[in-house]
Amino acid sequence: MSTFSAPKGTYDLLPPDSAAFLAVREALAAPLRGAGYGYVETPGFEHVELFSRGVGESTDIVTKEMYTLTTKGGTRLALRPEGTASVLRAALQASLHRAGSLPVKLWYSGTYYRYERPQAGRYRHFSQIGAEAIGTEDPALDAELIILAADAYRSLGLTGVRLLLNSLGDRECRPAYRAALQEFLRGLDLDEDTRARIEINPLRVLDDKRESVRRQLAGAPAMSDHLCQACKEYHEQVRDLISGAGVAFTDDERLVRGLDYYTRTTFEFVHDGLGSQSAVGGGGRYDGLSEMLGGPALPSVGWAVGVDRTLLALRAEGVVQDLPSPTDVFAVPLGEEARRELFTMVTALRRAGVAADFAYGGRGVKSAMKSANRSGARYAVVAGDRDLAEGVVQVKDLGSGEQSPVPLTAVVDDLRRRLA
């Protein structure tokens, strides 16, 4: 028994659950690859300032949840708590916005880290698929990303995912709303930390999940009443485009998301089967983030979808994924000569694109056949000295139990034909 265990709030991803995880990750990424998004991968840690500038000094992520460290040289680093700031930093560093036509379309997959209270659906390390479209202000781009996420959920068989949609305005109309919201919030019965947040970023108070706070927010001014004409028209175009694509949504004037960089379009995908941690993904437009990070003006939009949360949503709906078996053929040798011949055959099968495994360890036929059945293989190939003397192997259909001899020289082609 190991004396070590995974740190609190983390988990190990092991077979057979890992197969479902990989299938979900592939399904979430597939629509992005089909829409011109290229893959990007960033380091697991970045300079602390990247997140304090981009995500926001007042956010819980920066103030309470980031894992930080100081190198021997005195550099302050943080394990990445989210993906957008890192991806935009990488795009700016590589001058991708100068390399060709805009937008720069990128997608990514990785693990992120936040020091949070562990609970169902919330871990201290979590996996996401993300997408960013950098350098273009266009409601069709916002709609494209929303539709791609909705299509990914649909491809998995999920029916209980709901889309919440809002607009946070821009630098022209948000200041007036910010002032009105601050005036309202200052009159509420709030704790000291929340009162401090009112002065730094009052919109984040609307994202407070505590019931004692949410009750008092019932009469808060709505952003929709303060949107300038340009933002209203932009938001209507987004709504029309996603409606035209058959994607249903609910307008949610309290939806602000938890990061400071969002402007205009903001959205969240939720699933009611997940309890308090109902969000399975979300994102929005962040037109000023590039300038916050020292880059040029690059209006952008993106989202991140939780792989872990999506798996929980599938289980909540009872959706059974159709996962391919990791093994198609399992070889069972009886004797040393058969061991050499079947090992060569297994190698040839793998090179021919057939998933094949082998009974290692010199086990008896009964034990080896149990392993063959547990592997999920459709066929077992069994051979002993008598079979080899006749130049054949026995191919057994593990579903029907039927068995027939096949010439050793033809077994690879025979199995490929059966599996086609």
Image (cartoon, grey):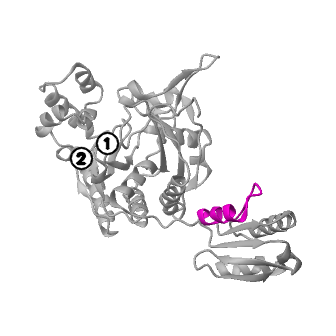
Mark 2 in CB contact with mark 1 (< 8 angstroms) = yes
Q: Measured from the top left, where is residue 292 in percent x and y?
A: 45, 33
Q: Is residue 122 left or right of residue 326?
A: left
Q: Nearer the viewer, residue 131 or 280?
A: 280
Give the mark nearest the N terminus, 2 or 1: 1
Residue under the image location 28 percent in, 60 percent down: 239
Badge 2 is on which residue? 228
The quadrant of the image that shows the C terminus is bottom right
Quick check: can you spot residue 160? yes
Q: Amino acid at mark 1?
A: Asp
Q: Which residues are magenta?
A: 357-375
Q: Measured from the top left, where is residue 301 in percent x and y?
A: 42, 49
Q: On the image, which quarter does residue 202 sit in?
A: top left
Badge 1 is on which residue? 170
Q: Nearer the viewer, residue 186 or 360?
A: 360
Residue under the image location 41 percent in, 43 percent down: 287
The quadrant of the image that shows the N terminus is top right
Q: Is residue 359 left or right of residue 392?
A: left
The magenta stretch spans residue 373: yes
Q: Amino acid at mark 2?
A: Cys
Give the tally of numbered discs: 2
Classify 316 as above or below 68: below
Classify 160 as above or below 179: below
Q: Measured from the top left, where is residue 114 in percent x and y?
A: 44, 33
Q: Measured from the top left, where is residue 41 in percent x and y?
A: 59, 45
The kind of secondary structure element at disc 1 is loop
